[in-house]
Amino acid sequence: MSRTDDRFSNSSSVVVAQSKAITATSAVAEIVAQLPSDSLALVLLFVSPWYDPHEFIAEFARFSEHSNVFGCTTAGELAPDGWGDNSVVALGFEARDFVVVARPFSDLANFRVEEGRSLGTELRQELARCAPEIPDQNSFGLLLIDGLCQREEAVMSSIYASLDDIPVVGGSAGDGLRFEKTWVFYDGQAHTDAAVLILLKTSLPFRLFKCDNFEPTSMKMVVTEADIECRVVKEINAEPAAEEYSRAVGLIDTKLDAFSFASHPVLVRVGGAYYARSIQRMNPDGSLSFFCAIDEGMVLTAAKPRNPIGAALDLFAETRDEIGEVSLYLGFECVLRRLDAEQHQFARDMSELYRENRVVGFHGYGEQYRSMHVNQTLTGVAIGKRAQSA
């Protein structure tokens, strides 16, 4: 039976629970037993696709008394004991430290920007009414979204415009490495083609973060033909996309797989900064499907890796300098970062580093950071500790 790690004890503002039980019923029982029954403003559930999503959330709704319960399926879990699979990670946010409001988005295939702006405005105003004594700048948002909906950019841009500088981070739900269907949890059910936006106010110190380990090279590529709606690049530099990508990044073997893409992402420059645009798969016709939005004429830059351990250590040091001792890091990490670590044999070191620094969350198919949907990145929010009474 799994239990709450001592470092995530009930004295923390966020209680973390974990289960590796074989059945959904047993996993729910273990999670519910580890969470306080009456003091939480929010419960987040990150659930392996090992479990049936409908069965799991229905069981949780049946046995749990919590009302604000949200979550999604994963491509791996960031657990209290490090990187995991076939498990459930739950986070309970204490009502004494957090005020929470949330709204779901459904039918993302027909999503309209006006709908997102309206929902974001309503939610921001509701949060202000719920906690007028806490300054608005003490707010942040979380977005959990279907990782295969191909609507992340539209949703993020619409809510960003309506939240009056409330910053948002989040993750795109995963399905292991099957890429078949992902699920978001709300209202006691599992939904696809859906998302949920959660806004939180807190008197605790916090810091949003983004961490990656790639730098641009001088090698540029131009998308010359694409199916924009489906995020498929057909030609790069007027050549078949997979062939030209392989040539540009120095891959001799043209049989591209997830490990190839994990080790050789491409970058785009936005507002003076570079962001990864990761490739999901090579298609039978030699085209490339991307995790993020693409466009004809887009310039892609080949990337080179830098030390991922060093990048993570820099993140942890910068966060401590800014907000002091950290209670936990709620993290949303691209599954391709995990595959790259496994391929280059530093996965155990990264997992241990996350365990030591209390990084919990999930691996997924993309990450949200402020107004951007990004790839091959770790994003999230670091939650500081409550000031000790004199």
Image (tube, rainbow, N blue to C red):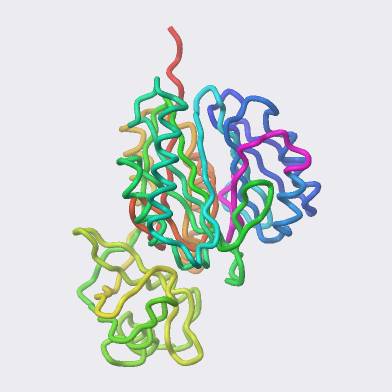
Left or right of 153 in this view: 87: right
Residue at the spot x=43%, y=56% of the render? 367
Residue at the spot x=56%, y=63% of the render? 193
The answer to whether residue 364 is magenta is no
Q: Is residue 309 visible?
A: no
Q: Is residue 246 above or below residue 141?
A: below
**Measured from the top left, where is residue 184 in percent x and y?**
59, 55
Q: Foreground: 338 or 60?
A: 60
Q: Is residue 14 above or below residue 133?
A: below
Q: Is residue 29 visible?
A: yes
Q: Which residues are magenta?
A: 61-79
Q: Foreground: 218 or 91?
A: 91
Left or right of 56 in this view: 314: left
User: Which residue extends farthest top?
Assistant: 390
> On the rendered image, what quadrant is the C terminus found in?
top left
> On the rendered image, what quadrant is the N terminus found in?
top right
Q: Foreground: 182 or 329?
A: 182
Residue at the spot x=23%, y=77% of the render? 219
**Measured from the top left, where is residue 320 in percent x and y?**
36, 33
**Measured from the top left, where is residue 306 in percent x and y?**
32, 61
Q: Is residue 21 above or below residue 323?
A: below
**Measured from the top left, where is residue 231 in percent x and y?**
41, 76
In the rendered image, which quarter is residue 74 located in?
bottom right
